Amino acid sequence: MSTNASARAASTLAANSFREALLAVGGEVHLVHTAAEAQACLQAVLEEAHVRELVHHAAETLAPLQLSALAQQLQLTGPHGIGPQAHREHCARAGAGLTGAIAGIAATGTLVLAAAATTPRSTSLLPPLHVALLHSARIVPDIAAALLLFPAQALPSQIINITGPSRTGDIEHDLTTGVHGPARLVVILLHPESEHHP
Amino acid sequence: MLSPQGHFAERAKEAVADAHLRAAVRRTVDRLRDLRRTTEANDSAMPLRREKARLVREHSVAALPHLLEQFTQACRRNGTVVHRAADAAEACGIALSLLRTHAARRVVKSKSMVTEEIGLNEALERDGIEVTETDLGEWIIQLAGERPSHIILPAIHKTRHDVQRLFERESGTTLSPDTARLCAHARIRLREKFLQADAGISGANFAVASTGSIALFTNEGNGRLVTTLPRVHIAFMGMERVVADLDALASMAEVLPRSATGQKLTSYCTVITGPRGPGELDGPEHLHVIIVDNGRSAVWRDPEFRDVLRCIRCAACLNVCPVYAQVGGHSYGGTYPGPIGAVLTPLLRPEQRSATELAEASTLCAACTEACPVGIPLHDMLVRLRRREQALHPHRVQRLMLRVAMRFARSAKAGALPALLRAASHGGTAIVLRKLVPALDHWQRTRALPPAPAQTFRALWPQLAQEAMNEH
């Protein structure tokens, strides 16, 4: 097997493991193979949920989704040119938040995000629906490997590991989602067919 | 508060008489225990994960003073202000003065055992500060004016109808007893509190010495809201929460959720390093960490009990304890229930005689030790605590009765005992016997006498001994 082919096989295994683990905790996963498919998937998810306002990160990880194309259908709010108060208000009323994951964890189906100027915390927290784009090449085996992705001497102000929707069993063990964070977590998992890794 | 009021026996008596409470506790411990066992059984790496976690905690506790110093230095570099509090009063005092400095009158809290231990809410409320617990279970308990009955699921003793009534009283609206509706109501009410809050107070599941970070594990997401929306974040941690580095933290993440609820990871696990960074749109502008001693350094100096500081508050020991399953969390009287509470409470409060008796609330079956993911010998510690108590306050009557019992057991008269027991556990005879012996009647009100076997051990012994000989 060529190096590319074996890398491809490894990332397919990782993508499958990630998908299974996330499905087991009530997350939703859409496997797509091209940027165009990812975009169509995002559009379908937002339409189906009747989202009228979308708050989003400005991460390079979101580049495959030509967000500006969505601007005709819904209100888009990114982190640029906006103050903390306006950002909070937008996040509090938006129907969905869109993030680009820094990494995924295969063993647990976890999304790894980090707080920064272009990737605020509230985007993945306040709206009732969290949609994340994850590239299969960014999946690591476990949480130890995920934490190693960050330089220990200059950690982001918050590393946010998300494994499924917000959940509680506090009333009579009745499992309920969305008590504080998003009730739905949708991951668009981009797993390219060819060996073209970004 | 940490210190129990009154006596264990009195509190347990009340709990045992409450059929609803007993059913709720039983259901909870069985469910959590089964979730953990299923996860562990399907995970061939679990013994390794536990071993690594044990080593990490052993090292953390051994190197505690050094790690705390390292943690403090790292916090200084990332803009986190660290405070050390010797006791509950000092810890509450520091929080109060910080809230005053930041003109914070409204506080949202995420679940924290150590703030329960130091009685923080009461202290803040006395100063006119509005404190809202935001973990759903903790909020229910707060509205009811009660204390948590389980470390992981604090409101297990409340039915959905209880919750409906509490929420209706708080909001002045009419609600349905449907769980999803009740949760949706809590989301709306508490979201308002989050958006209005001046300060957020959290605990810390772990602190990372090398990076000056604190880690929070939650499922609801309230821990994230508390550390995202208010402009000030105050995190409380018991001084033993610290681990060396991110790799050690990863080891903890591998066992804490698995041992607590059988989850591979909680819905949210956040690693917080300093306040909001330059240009960031959310997150607190000020981050304070209050490291609480409150009796812990004395435990650390005690070689017989130092290992109890390894505890990661997963509550696995509660869920396998036959005593906890019968009496529930409130019987322990303090903040920490179950086997860990029976060990920790008397150690943190050695001056309290009523805490020492918690060591008696055990059958010494060692299920707790077996369940503990970080290898704390809980049942050994319970024996050591009893021994220590006996040395300090010898119980003369108890010793005398033991001597009499031993003499009886060795004598020929003991042969009559099995027949008596068999009769006692036999339907009709049992009732007559219970009426004849009032003490037995009283005893059986909350306990069923197990059926006596057909043959006694004494009778079986010659044959068993022969079989054992033949095997060699």
Image (spheres, rainbow, N blue to C red):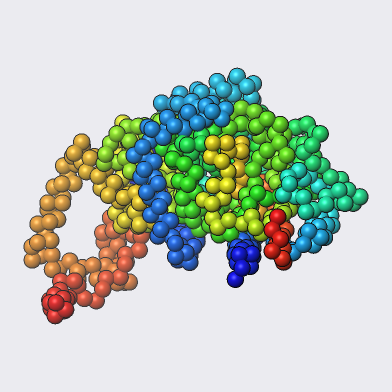
Q: How many marks?
A: 0
Instruction: Work out whether residue A103 can be spotted.
Output: yes
Vertical placement of residue B284 versus A91, above or below:
above
Vertical placement of residue B175 versus B193, above or below:
below
Q: Which one is nearer the viewer's eye here, A55 or B356? A: A55
| Residue occupying image coordinates x 64% and y 28% | B285
Q: Picture coordinates of residue B372 (x, y %)?
A: 38, 53
Left or right, B257 with respect to B87, comes to: right
Q: Picture coordinates of residue B259 (x, y %)?
A: 46, 55
Vertical placement of residue B366 versus B342, above or below:
below
Q: Picture coordinates of residue B421 (x, y %)?
A: 23, 67
Residue A119 position by quadrant: top right
Q: Picture coordinates of residue B129 (x, y %)?
A: 61, 26
Instruction: Work out whether residue B344 can be spotted.
Output: no
Q: Residue furthest front?
A: A2
Q: Which one is nearer the viewer's eye here, B242 or A32? A: A32
Q: Which one is nearer the viewer's eye here, B341 or B149? A: B341
| Residue occupying image coordinates x 36% and y 37% | B63
| Residue occupying image coordinates x 60% and y 43% | A159
Quadrant the C terminus of chain B occupies: bottom left
Residue B58 position by quadrant: top left
Quadrant the N terminus of chain B occupies: top left
Q: Residue furthest left?
A: B411
Q: Which one is nearer the viewer's eye here, B241 or B131? A: B241
| Residue occupying image coordinates x 60% and y 20% | B100
